[in-house]
Amino acid sequence: MKITTTRFGEIEVEDQAIISVPGGLIGFSDHERYMIIEHKPESPFFWFQAVDRSDLAFVIANPFIFKHDYDVQLNDAILDELGIEDQEDVAVYVIVTVPHGQPQGMTANLLGPLIINTKSKVVKQIILNDDRYSHRHPLISQES
């Protein structure tokens, strides 16, 4: 299928690349189909692009790249909801905010990770109740 995007123009997408987000992301409940697009080769960043809305895309990243001790506990209800039977079928991403023209101000939402069943391509955004994390975790140290 062909998808039109604001950032990438028209792209061809295989049906199996479509990711389902039942109920949508927080604040975007009307959009339940997404795809992951590589930002650049070897970049830690990806685009979580809505299939049905060309201008809706989020920068996402694997949080373990920049927060090695990040700990997401998935309870049985979430595992069942996503149909996860094996930990190897789980991928975790977080949404990254890049202030316009200020990459040094990038932050990651560690409180609202995206949990992906990589086998079934189903995603749920969960909310962590953990004081160790912030919805604005800096990705670049402010220390010089």
Image: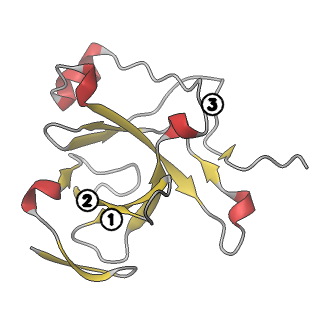
Q: Secondary structure at mark 1?
A: strand
Judging depth in this view, the residue of 52 and 7 nearest the camera is 7
Distance between the alpha carbons at the discs numbered 1 and 3: 25 Å
| Circles 2, 1 touching at the beta carbon (< 8 Å) | yes
Q: Which mark, residue 4?
A: none
Q: Secondary structure at mark 3?
A: loop
Residue 96 on image: x %, y %: 54, 53
The residue lying at 73 percent from left, 59 percent from top is 105
Name the amino acid type tagged 1: Gln
The residue lying at 42 percent from left, 42 percent from top is 93
Q: Which residue is mark 3?
A: 133
Residue with the most extreme front position: 42
Distance between the alpha carbons at the discs numbered 2 and 1: 5 Å
Q: Which comes sooner in the sequence, label 2 or label 3?
A: 2
Q: Where's the N terminus, which quadrant? A: bottom left
- 18 over 125 or under it: above or below: below
- 73 over 42 or under it: above or below: above
Name the amino acid type tagged 3: Tyr
The residue lying at 48 percent from left, 39 percent from top is 112
Residue 118 on image: x %, y %: 22, 38
Residue with the most extreme top position: 76
Q: Which mark, residue 34?
A: 2
Residues packed near mark 3 inside 10 Å, few (<14), some (14 to 19) or many (20 plus): some
Q: Which mark, residue 49?
A: 1
Residue with the most extreme right position: 144
Name the amino acid type tagged 2: Tyr
The answer to whether 70 appears left or right of 52 in the picture is right
Residue 15 on image: x %, y %: 8, 61
Residue 99 on image: x %, y %: 66, 66
